[in-house]
Image (cartoon, coloured by chain):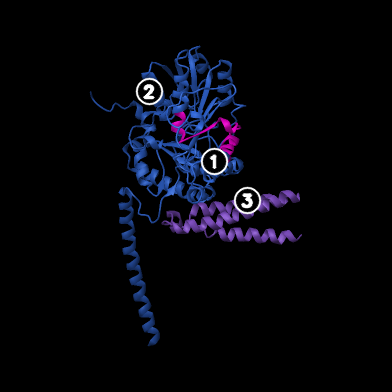
Amino acid sequence: MYRQVTKFRNAISTILNEKKSFTSLRNLSSNAEDDKYKIKDNFEGRPLYLDVQATSPTDPRVLDAMLPYLTHYYGNPHSRTHAYGWESEAAVEKAREYVADIIGADPREIIFTSGATESNNIAIKGVARFYKEKKKHIITTQTEHKCVLDSCRALEGEGFTVTYLPVKTNGIICLEELEKAITPETAIVSIMSVNNEIGVKQPIDAIGVLCKQKKVFFHTDAAQAVGKIHLDVNSMNIDLMSISGHKIYGPKGIGAIYIRRRPRVRVEAIQSGGGQERGIRSGTVPAPLAVGFGEACRLAKQEMAYDHAHVEKLSKRLIDRLCGSLTHVIRNGDDVETYPGCVNLSFAYVEGESLLMALKDIALSSGSACTSASLEPSYVLRAIGADEDLAHSSIRFGIGRFTTEAEVDYTAKKCIHHVTRLREMSPLWEMVQEGVDLKTIKWSQH
Amino acid sequence: MASKTKTLQLYRTMLRESSKIPSYNFREYAIRKIRDTFKQNKQCTESTVIQNQLKEAQRNLEIIKRQAIVGQLYSTEKLVIEYTT
């Protein structure tokens, strides 16, 4: 009797379980249907940070060096009459040595500024205006940062002529074209070391030699390069260089400009004031920021090889994962001459902004932070000749010192999922799968 | 060598203190960096170099301790990856 009851109970529970599993299956399928059109994933926690080209997290060791100067040592580094000033000054000078050290310069050639934008302004406008009586020509490239292009634009208004050199499809300039562009009128050539959007490294060595030979000043915006790749102002014949603090795990709001002393490069100051920083950048040097910047440079030099190996490994891992699971993925920029921490990929037939929306649990960007508010495709991608549609579908993955392997795996997994999902919804993708060449289609009658 | 146990002790203390850093990225970096540096310096035989490395490690241990506290004072929500794994 008892046995029969148990048997009966077991039978009932099996039926119930089956029913339960059936309903749960139905829920699952409707969830999957919902998921397909859901813009955002529901997630808990803060997003992962993969946008180190925009800014990098402040290294705790940098903060540790800064904290005393944000609390007890608050003296003005330019105060010469008391100990508060002296201790701040000593710290700022030590920081200047570290900054100089990372690019092989003399500390007296380093001027602290508010960041690379200000440094670029001082370099381009400062040199152009100082030598304007004799030289009225500037050369730069189409893929420079906005602040360089805008400084040149401003100078055009003052009567200077500017040559915006095109780049090849891999993002690198053509040296012959640069040589052709240099005239006796040319005052300065400004070409960035590492591009902020596509990570392409320009042939700084060769440009330096060419500029020296033609007796033209050579400025390089190295905000994305310092601390990441080896740079030496003397062996590379660099006359002026812009450096940024917050791209190398330092504090925001500080940078530096290197200005060569021998042979001397002269610049007209933009800011008038108390004549600090050899009169080139008046205004009190922010001692805590300078100390943090110096420490960031010291660490960057010390760990360059270690960090580079880490970044390279993760970068390869990310690209292998994505390209292993997805087709029609194009890497923007050169395959070899690129800093590995900047991976700019175009996922064809997927709109970049939709993908960014879907990947809200990962902090990514489609290009430079300065222009991320607009939906216009990046001018850098257009300059390398990327098709309009591919320029619209690009995503920049920034990998740095603090990125982990698990983060890269998570990003790759999410990215593959959403690219596949978005492509499934796309009529264009369907046509491509059917073998239609989209370029042959006439989209409108008129 | 007497300093061998001391080194090992320092290594363990550094890892233990690093695990108290609240930020996922900084914590993971500290642990990775400590492991790699000690492993790399294992073959080192020159006593002055070893002494300098130990001094540097001691300095870093102090930074880790302080920064773990700073991190705890201004802690934020955990990262999405810490919930999923």
Name the quadrant of the C terminus of chain A.
Answer: top left
Residue A305 falls in image quadrant: top right
Residue type marked 1: Glu
Who comes first in sequence, dot 1 or dot 2?
1
Q: Quadrant of the N terminus of chain A?
A: bottom left
Which chain does the residue under circle 3 lie in? B
Q: Mark 1: few, some, or many residues within 10 Å (few <14, many ≥20)? A: many
Q: Residue at x 69, y 50 (%)?
A: B52
Tell me residue A8's x, y (percent). 35, 80
Q: Is residue A357 magenta?
A: no
Residue to which mark 3 is pinned: B36
Three-letter code, disc 3: Asp
Q: Residue at x 58, y 43 (%)?
A: A299
Crowding near the residue tagged with mark 2, few <14, some 14–19, many ≥20 C-alpha atoms within 10 Å: few
Q: Chain of mark 2?
A: A
Whole-Å distance between the Cαs marked 3 and 1?
36 Å
Chain ID at mark 1: A
Q: Which mark is residue A154?
A: 2
The residues colored magenta run A94-120
Answer above or below: position of A40 versus A391: below
Front one among A168 and A173: A173
Q: Farthest residue in the front direction? A: A81
Residue B76 vertical position relative to residue A196 in the rendered view, above or below? below
Q: Position of residue A214 (x, y in %)?
A: 56, 15
Q: Based on the displayed image, in which of its 4 quarters is residue A151 positioned?
A: top left
Q: Residue furthest left?
A: A446
Q: Residue A222, can we see it? A: no
Q: Which chain is blue?
A: A
Q: Are marks 3 and 1 in contact (CB under 8 Å)?
A: no
SS at circle 2: helix
**Which disc number belongs to residue A89?**
1
Hue of chain B?
Answer: purple
